[in-house]
Amino acid sequence: MKNYKGSCFLWLLLGLFASSFLTAAPAKVSFVRPVNLMVATQIVKLSLNGDEIAKIGQGKILVVESEIGKHSIQTKVGLSLGVPNITGFSGAKKFKSKVTFDKPEHFFKIIFKSSLMGGKHHVIEIDEAEYQMIIGKL
């Protein structure tokens, strides 16, 4: 019976070495924020993996490149004027979500969902047809 320990170690080492030269495939990620007069004064700070990537206003589009894999998306708003008991007196609350980029392109819309204790700007994945429809109305 042959000893395969040496060859297994060699394959493991070769796999680790090869993976260090491979780069993750890019994913094009598009965000759109439709107009909503209820939160017209709020500028949304959009973060990807904890890093702020943009401040996005009403009727704006943002396209970024990221790596395929698991990511976190967060929105938050600083102090702003709003409709009391809908948007909250101090702006909107933070929104956090975990997403997986597993395709070359992903599309998201940033919409405000109201609540009695202060609403949130949700980031919702949509298909390309809905994305095109929204940007066609901007």
Image (cartoon, rainbow, N blue to C red):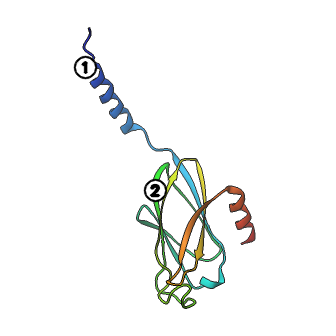
Residue placed farthest to the top in the image? Answer: 1
Q: What is the x, y in percent for residue 16? A: 33, 34
- The disc at residue 128 is none
The answer to whether 128 appears left or right of 98 in the picture is right
Q: Residues within 10 Å of mark 2 (few under 14, many from 20)?
A: some
Q: In this rendering, is residue 87 above or below 8?
A: below
Q: What is the x, y in percent for residue 66? A: 50, 54
Q: Residues within 10 Å of mark 1 (few under 14, many from 20)?
A: few
Instruction: Quadrant for the C terminus, please.
Output: bottom right
The residue lying toward the viewer, choosing from 42 and 94, is: 94
**Residue identified by numbered label 2:** 71
Q: In this rendering, is residue 114 above or below 62?
A: below
Tag 1 and tag 2, C-beta contact below 8 Å: no
Q: Quadrant of residue 56?
A: bottom right
**Residue identified by numbered label 1:** 6
Total count of labels: 2
Dot 1 amino acid type: Gly
The residue lying toward the viewer, choosing from 12 and 116, is: 116
The answer to whether 114 appears left or right of 96 in the picture is right
Q: Residue at the spot x=46%, y=52% of the render?
A: 70
